[in-house]
Amino acid sequence: MRWPWPVVLLAACVSTNAAVMNPSLKLQPVCPDGVQVFSDSSRVGKPYTEVAVLNSKGESDMTSESGMIKSQRKKAAELGANGVILGTMKDPSTGAKIASSLFGTSANRKGNAIAIYIPGDSTRVAAACKTMK
């Protein structure tokens, strides 16, 4: 069996950090599949609490948008958030890509999102996480 190296590299090259908005809010972690992704806040459709601002980055040659979203879902799940509202995703400029090729510097794709907690969504989260076990 051949190992799927490109898939592993794409997922491993994205890092996401979180700036927690309310440190006193303590939530239980959930599985990443329990974190629903929304294109904007109007799509949530239920009351929610903002948990953290998520910032992701990864080498542009090795990072896909889906890899960034996967990383954001994972970080949100660790925080106990059950939703992510996507923000912007930006590719590095042409100049940054050229400098990366010439000088070996990094040319990062960057993205941000808001991790949210939707109190009325626990049944969906439980069902999504149960299928993972």
Image (tube, grey):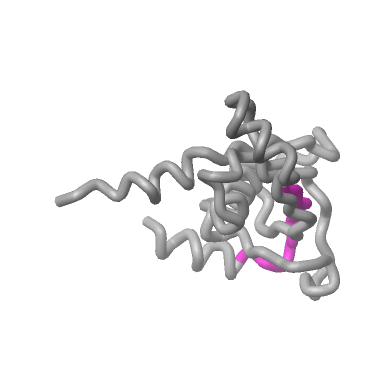
**Measured along the vertical axis of the image, is residue 100 above or below residue 53?**
above
Residue 72 image point, x, y percent: 63, 48
Residue occupying the far left of the picture: 1
* Relative depth, front residue between 23 and 61: 61
- Is residue 110 shown to the viewer in this render? yes
Does residue 27 appear in this view?
no
Residue 101 lies in what quarter of the image?
Answer: top right
For image coordinates 38% across by 48% down, the residue present is 6
The stretch drawn in magenta includes residue 112: yes
- The residue sitting at 50% across, 67% down in the picture is 127
- To which quarter of the image does residue 47 belong? bottom right
Left or right of 117 in this view: 6: left
Does 24 sit left or right of 89 as displayed?
right
Q: Nearer the viewer, residue 39 or 46?
A: 39
x, y (%) of residue 120?
A: 72, 67
Q: Residue at x 51, y 44 (%)?
A: 62
Residue 102 against residue 68 in the figure, above or below: above
Q: Magenta span covers which residues?
A: 111-122
Q: Which quarter of the figure is the C terminus placed in?
A: bottom left
User: Looking at the rendering, which quadrant does residue 44 occupy?
Assistant: bottom right
The residue nearer to you, when weighing 109 against 120, is: 109
Q: Is residue 41 above or below residue 71?
A: below
**Residue 40: in magenta span:** no
Residue 28: image location, x then y, percent:
62, 44
Where residue 8 sits in the image (x, y, percent)? 39, 45
What residue is drawn where x is 78% and y is 51%?
114
